[in-house]
Amino acid sequence: EKNHNRNSRGALIVLEGLDRSGKTSQSSKLLSYLEGQGYSVESWRFPDRNTGVGQMISSYLANKSQLDDHAIHLLFSANRWEKRSLMETKLRSGTTLIVDRYSYSGVAFSSAKGLNIEWCKAPEMGLLAPDLVLYLDIPPEKAAERGGYGGERYEQLEFQKKVAQSYQLLHDASWKIIDACLPIEDVEMQLRETVLDCVMTCQEGKSLSLLWS
Ligand code: T5A
Ligand code: NA
């Protein structure tokens, strides 16, 4: 374990992007990479479909239930809030978290439906701010070709184009844009150095902050 300094904390690293941009593939690669480097690291994802709230979200995404756009937005947010204190405990104890989707997905997908962006951001305020957001950038047409969209609610080209536009409004200093059209191994190489830098900066004492700052 490389966490010799007892005050050192883990990094909160988020992967964002359109459906099929490669987030899940890269999460598992980063997990193995950081473990191999001797770091304490876990891979998380949102929605976390294992909780009661997560099961409601999963049923909605599978088109097995209908919900008002505002109601499902708040459920996605609640699903992050129910994991917030565990997230902080893990980070403070020195574990780095690689998180597949976070508040940016929440805002990008709901505002792509036409909900007011400030309204969408409000319930996310006070959640932990990521130290690094890796945005896997891919044209919607190209993402749609990958493995074919399954039956989930948002897996439609026209909607994904709107989501891509919404994401554009959310960039901040924590974002790094990654060319996700390259082969899987090349995308991974782009991520490694950035992630390692981030983990070391957090170990050296960078403090945790809150959304949206
Ligand atoms: N949502 C989510 C909200 O509306 N609000 C919220 O608050 C949150 C958190 C569920 C949906 O919920 C929405 C967003 C989503 O629509 P999900 O369960 O994470 O989100 O589902 P997806 O993101 O759609 O997961 P996918 O599996 O489709 O996409 P990934 O994880 O980005 O892609 P991945 O790694 O599974 O790869 C997809 C395919 O492409 C290939 C892979 O082998 C796989 O077949 N691939 C590549 N092919 C060529 N080159 C590469 N570089 C490749 N990388 C991967
Ligand atoms: Na995924």
Image (cartoon, helix red, strand yellow):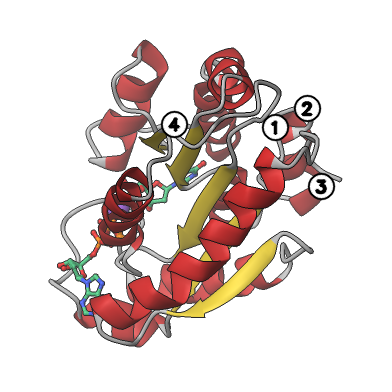
- Residue denoted by label 3: 118
Locate residue 81 relative to residue 116 in the image: left or right: left
Amino acid beneath label 3: Glu
- Residue denoted by label 1: 128
Locate residue 205 relative to residue 27 in the image: left or right: right
Please tell me which of labels 1 and 4 falls first in the chain.
4
> Quarter holding the N terminus?
top left
Label 3 neighbourhood size at 10 Å, few (<14), some (14-19), many (20+)? few
- Residue denoted by label 4: 67
Q: Residue at x 50, y 58 (%)?
A: 16
Residue 112 location, quadrant: bottom right
Residue 47 location, quadrant: top left
Q: How far separated are the C-alphas under marks 4 and 3?
A: 21 Å
Q: Which mark is residue 126?
A: 2
- Figure check: 69 above or below 136: above
Please tell me which of labels 3 and 2 falls first in the chain.
3
Q: Nearer the viewer, residue 77 or 31?
A: 31
Locate residue 69 relative to residue 59 in the image: left or right: right
Please tell me which of labels 2 and 4 falls first in the chain.
4
Q: How far separated are the C-alphas under marks 3 and 1?
A: 18 Å
Label 4 neighbourhood size at 10 Å, few (<14), some (14-19), many (20+)? few
Q: Which mark is residue 10?
A: none
Q: Secondary structure at mark 4?
A: loop
The reply to whether the residue tagged 1 has its Cβ within 8 angstroms of ligand 1 is no
Q: How far separated are the C-alphas under marks 1 and 4?
A: 27 Å
Amino acid beneath label 1: Leu
Front of the two marks 3 and 1? 1
Front of the two marks 1 and 2? 1
